[in-house]
Every structure is written in structure tokens, then in C-alpha cells.
Image (cartoon, rainbow, N blue to C red):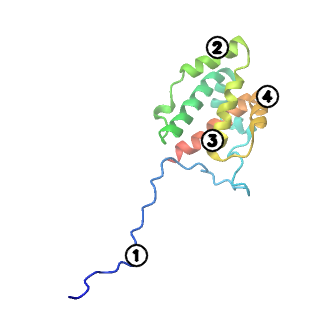
Amino acid sequence: MADTKEHVSNQPQGTAPMSVGGNRNAKNCPLGPDGKRGWSFGLFDCFARCGLCCWAVWCPCVVYGKNRQRLRSLQNQGTPLPGGGERYDGHCCVYGAINVATGHARALQIHIREQVRERYGIHGGPIEDCVTSWFCLVCALTQERREIELEENSF
């Protein structure tokens, strides 16, 4: 009886994992040797988005809350938040209450800045996040929102 076994020379190949999410470097900012990059927009580019900048001046709690909602949606669902999120959510209210009571709501914003930096592979660290959030809150909130929007717009 002849040997009827066939020899398989190629093994089946796995398929590439499905990628969820948008482009986290939509402006193709150059990466440094550490694999990190700078922000897509400078800190003082906040004035290029006057409407957003005004919201950050007069209602930073709203910008903070929406940034947080939008970032969470990208992190947890891998998709932009439909409608851009609620204007007044619980986190917005907590931020506003802490700000009215103590004036130190910026401490909440530092954590969101760190998460944005980590998600997009941006240079920086906790001290820089703290100083930027404390002394340049309006520009920091605007810069973070614009970074999140770049990813959302790439879907």
C-alpha cells in the first residue's frame, strides 16, 4: 500500500488583530527616540479655538467634564462619544463644587491630563502636568480637548 499522507509545508497564518480606535497621532508628529512625541498643538494655541477657549475660561468644569467623558469613551469603547457627551454631568458638578468651595479643582484636571498624555504617547510627566494644569488651566483644557478631537475625527 502506498503512503498517501501529504506533507504540509506551510502552516496556517493567524489574522491580524482587529484594531479599534482612531489615529492617535493624526498630525503625524515626529516620535523621539523614546517613542514619544510632542503635543499636536502648542499650549498657547488655545486662542485658535476661541469658542472652546471661552468655555474653558468661564466654565472650566464643563470642558473638564466633557474631556473626561470623551476620553473614557475612547478608552472603554474604542469609539467617539456620540454627540460629544453631556454638558453637565456628575464630574462637571463635582469639579464646580470643589472649585467654588476650595478653588483647587485643578487637582482633578491633572489626572485627566496625565491620561491624555499616556494615551497619545506625549512627552511629559506628573510635575509638568501639575504645573501646566495649575498655572495654565484654560490652555491645558483646550490643548487636551483638541488632542482628543483629533483622534475622534480620524474615525
Spot occupied by residue 117 in the image (x, y as percentages of width and height): 67, 41
What number is the disc on residue 133? none
- Closer to the chain start, of discs 4 and 1, is 1
108 over 29 or under it: above or below: above
Residue type, numbered disc 3: Glu
For the residue labelled by badge 1, is the local secondary structure a helix, a strand or a loop?
Answer: loop
Dot 4 falls on a residue whose secondary structure is helix
Residue 79 shown left or right of residue 101 in the figure: left
Q: Please, which residue is most extreme toward the left here? A: 1
Q: Which three-letter amino acid code belongs to the residue tagged 2?
A: Ala
Number of marks in picture: 4
89 or 62: nearer the eye? 89
Residue 97 can be seen in this image: yes
Tag nearer the camera, 1 or 2: 1
Q: Which residue is mark 1?
A: 10
* Rendering coords of residue 91 (x, y %): 58, 22
Pointer 3 or 1: first along the chain = 1
Q: Is residue 50 visible?
A: no
Percent x, y for residue 82?
46, 34
Secondary structure of residue under mark 2: helix
Mark 3–mark 4 Cα distance, whole angstroms, equals 20 Å
Residue at the front extreme of this rendering? 1
Q: Which residue is mark 4?
A: 135
- Mark in front: 3 vs 1: 1
**Residue drawn at 69 percent across, 43 percent down:** 41
Task: Residue type at mark 4: give it.
Answer: Phe
> Label 1 neighbourhood size at 10 Å, few (<14), some (14-19), many (20+)?
few
**N-terminal-most mark, 1 or 2:** 1
Q: If you read the primary sequence from the N terminus, does the residue marked by circle 4 or circle 2 appear first? A: 2
Under mark 1, the amino acid is Asn
State the residue position of label 3: 147
- Name the residue beneath numbered marker 2: 97
